[in-house]
Amino acid sequence: MNSTSTSKRLWDAFWQLANPKVFMGWSGRWLPWLVGLTVLFLASGLIWGFFFTPDDMRQGSTVKIIYLHVPAALMAINGYLLMFVGSLVWLIRRQHVSVLAAKAAAPVGMTMTLIALGTGAIWGQPMWGTYWVWDPRLTSFLILFLFYAGYIALWAAIDDDDTAADLTSILALVGLVFALLSRYAVLFWNQGLHQGTTVTFVDGAKQENISNVFFQPLLLSMVGFGLLFLTLLLIGTRSELRARRLKVLEARERMQ
Amino acid sequence: MIPDLGKYAVEVIGAYGMSFLALVLVCFVYIRRSRSVKRALIAAEAGKDA
């Protein structure tokens, strides 16, 4: 089998998930495995990082905050990108699963943004002498947090589901600018206290911004946070699909 | 058991504490909603079939 037909099959399988029945079956099969893998990666990354890594020469034990701060920031940005894709698919193809996945991703993404901001502030105080500065990366992250909050509030404020899906999707598209800024602000502007990107890959190889002693548990933690995001995303999307079905049944009952 | 965190112990433990709290809270909310919606849907579908 050549790679073109394999990728076509994967692409077709992906679009089949837009069918709520297929999605429920698929996610129900994968969820127990995802929960197990999440616990495994998160526990091993965080335990390794907290208990078995040395202090940094300059930052002392505060370097241990990296195992929370970087993965949370990574998922805050990628969670928003996922919301963007889900919203775009809804606006173009009107598939409910995609917009409900975007809706389910928002509270997790907001929590990740909050963790990134909170741990960053706690880390900033001893290293920079302040909890907060209006640095480009910090500011764009704060705006990203506000976009998440606005997106969730907009869903809650509108009764008609399809209208809410349309308006929140447009908001998600607008907010993409800040998700990208959060990621690339350190490259655009040189001013500011925040350091450059911790982990970068060029041609598939890790750049030496961070020693392997810290990088290996960080990688496990990043995978753990990613899996946690995915697990909660599936649980949340399943709940949203069930809630939608429940609404339909209740509406039918009222009409009889 | 806890490694020696030196003069930054409060900051490191504070960061881990707030992160765990946030993660446990978001997991709790998702699981609780999942269970309540599932229960309500099962009840509604049973009512429809009856």
Image (cartoon, grey):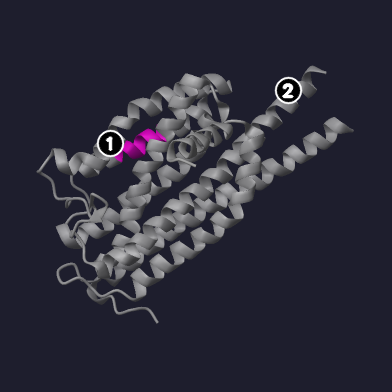
**Residue A255 on image: x %, y %:** 78, 17
Q: Residue at x 22, y 43 (%)?
A: A137
Q: Residues within 10 Å of mark 2 (few under 14, many from 20)?
A: few
Cα–Cα gap, marks 1 and 2: 41 Å
In the image, which residues are magenta? A142-150
Which kind of residue does numbered mark 2 sit on? Ala
Q: Residue at x 51, y 26 (%)?
A: A157
**Residue A253 on image: x %, y %:** 79, 23
The reply to whether label 1 and label 2 mark residues of one chain is: yes
- Chain for disc number 2: A
Among the 4 quarters of the image, the one containing residue A206? bottom left
Residue of label 1: A180
Is A230 or A203 nearer to us in this picture? Answer: A203
Q: In this view, does B46 lie to the left or right of A199?
A: right
- Chain for disc number 1: A
Residue of label 2: A251
Q: Residue at x 32, y 53 (%)?
A: A118
Residue B33 visible here: no
Is A24 or B47 nearer to us in this picture? Answer: A24
